[in-house]
Image: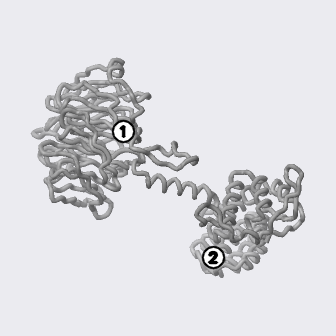
Amino acid sequence: MGGTENGEPPLKRAKESLGELNNFSVNSFCFEPTSNSLGDPMPRPLPSQGDGDLVGTKGVIRKQEFIKIITRALYSLGYDKTGALLEEESGIPLRSSIVSLFVRQVLDGKWDESVATLREIGLSDETVKSAFFVILEQKFFELLQQEKTMAALNTLRNEIAPLHINMKRVHELAACIISHSLGVVSSHGNLYVHSRSQILEKLETLLPAAMFVPERRLEHLVEQALDVQRDSCVFHNTLDSELSLYSDHQCGRNRIPSQTSQILQAHNDEVWYLEFSHNGKYLASASKDQSTVIWEVKENGAVCLRHTLIGHKKPVLTVSWSPDDNQLLTCGQEEVIRRWDVHSGECLHVYEKSGAGLISCGWFPDGKGVLSGITDKSICLWGLDGRELECWKGQRILKISDMAITSDGKKVISICRESAILLLDREAKFERLIEEDQVITSFSLSNDSKFLLVNLINQEIHLWSIEGDPKVISKYKGHKRTRFVIRSCFGGFGQAFIASGSEDSQVFIWHRSTGELLLALPGHSGAVNCVSWNPADPHMLASASDDRTIRIWGLDRMNLKCKDALSSSNGFVHHSCGKRR
């Protein structure tokens, strides 16, 4: 360990090893006194010195492992000279002499020698067999490539097959020989797909970490440290791009939107619903005044009126953005659904069902279908042209406008009874219920379609996991609800927070995992009916109220002026001209 084979200094050999070696440079390790950059003698410690040394304030980091990991990182980053110098100065080689010999033999294609060397290292039989298989498979392929078919066959019969592992692959290799002999390209994958350095990478995953320091081990440890800091940060609401290694990460309450940055006034009556587009560039609000407003979010964070959509004859209950955010659905109260062009404000189509009213709307994930709950308690799927594609009849929905479909398009979710939510599997033709003890007033589906946020009449919000057997995993309390439908939402970075409206005119924000109430934001003068968190900006939250206004909430540093934003608006009022079908 630490011996030299040809007496050349490590730096010179590191330079020669570039190319095929790349990150697998094999350096012999000289520990004789050498000169530093100033020409002074620099003694080198023996490899055995410092083996038991610990570094760090807590005394849990082994110095030898620490230096090896740094050395590995230097080679991985392409700093071969620096890596070799660290090995030389520390007296701690990245690899032992026998492992370095093994690496050289693999890269030189000396398969039999590498197998013999591996036997000497002293590994478990299972590990040795797995490594042998990788080495001998590469030997097999290279023999075929050299047109040495009989030699390849002998390797397969006498060396690979006797290992008695991965017999499926053994049969594929046999098929490769037949195909190669016939001049046919094998259907079992490309021959000779691995370079020798790739084989070495594969061997690294099989052999002990103490023998081969894993590739990018230092990066992995740093990422783990950042993950721990992020997970322990109660108020974490920062993009990963803003994290720094220079200091420990800790968000304060000021990283959660808590200050009113704008007050939007465009409706003449209570605002019942609002929702940001998927790309965060638009906000749609629905009102009792029978209108829907599309707001545009500027690059500087200002929110300006884009279009006022007129056409419904009853209050607008809800809206839904198309997957590409180019179209918007609006649903009147037990009336019709209208589909609008977001950019022009034109009504493109009107969906209705004879003898029944529509009470909810949503998009099929591919953007080619429209879903709706109907007053006859059925759910319908239409094509964009209004043609009915599917209809689920029976007790499928109540007169509540909440409905959702999972991102894979497989499950339709709706409130089917006062205290139950239906999970309808379209493909398996299977139904499952989420049952509560209290009356359900609304629900919201998470972006990953794995969780459901359920608002109850008893002033609680329950978080359900809907993967596998549905179960409640968290509860949120503190907001007020006695008479109206109050809606909540997921939001923030990684949807780590829960926000909700409240009848006491406040917006409530909880930590999703712990259920801790973090903030109650005053500002509105009427019940807050709905909230929506910008999916592209974790620092922007919107709330809709009976006071006819929409509040945009931002960080303390945001100081946008509502009047300036509204005065620069170029909004227009659009009247529906869509055909009824």
Mark positioned earlier in the residue sequence (2 or 1): 2
Tell me what residue is drawn at x 40 percent, y 37 percent.
279
- For residue 13, side relative to residue 293 (left or right): right
Percent coordinates x, y for residue 323 in the rendering: 36, 40
Which amino acid type is marked by label 1? Pro
Please identify the residue farthest to the front as the structure is shown: 57
Mark 2 highlights which residue?
127
- For residue 379, side relative to residue 205 (left or right): left
Quadrant of res 280: top left
- For residue 261, side relative to residue 95 (left or right): left
Secondary element under disc 2, as helix, strand or loop, is helix
Tell me what residue is drawn at x 42 percent, y 32 percent.
557
Can residue 202 be seen? yes
Q: Are marks 2 and 1 in contact (CB under 8 Å)?
A: no
Can residue 178 be seen? no
Percent coordinates x, y for residue 338 in the rendering: 23, 33
* Viewer-nearest residue: 464 or 420: 464
* Viewer-nearest residue: 361 or 5: 5
Percent coordinates x, y for residue 482 in the rendering: 13, 45
Mark 1 highlights which residue?
257
Percent coordinates x, y for residue 33 in the rendering: 87, 62
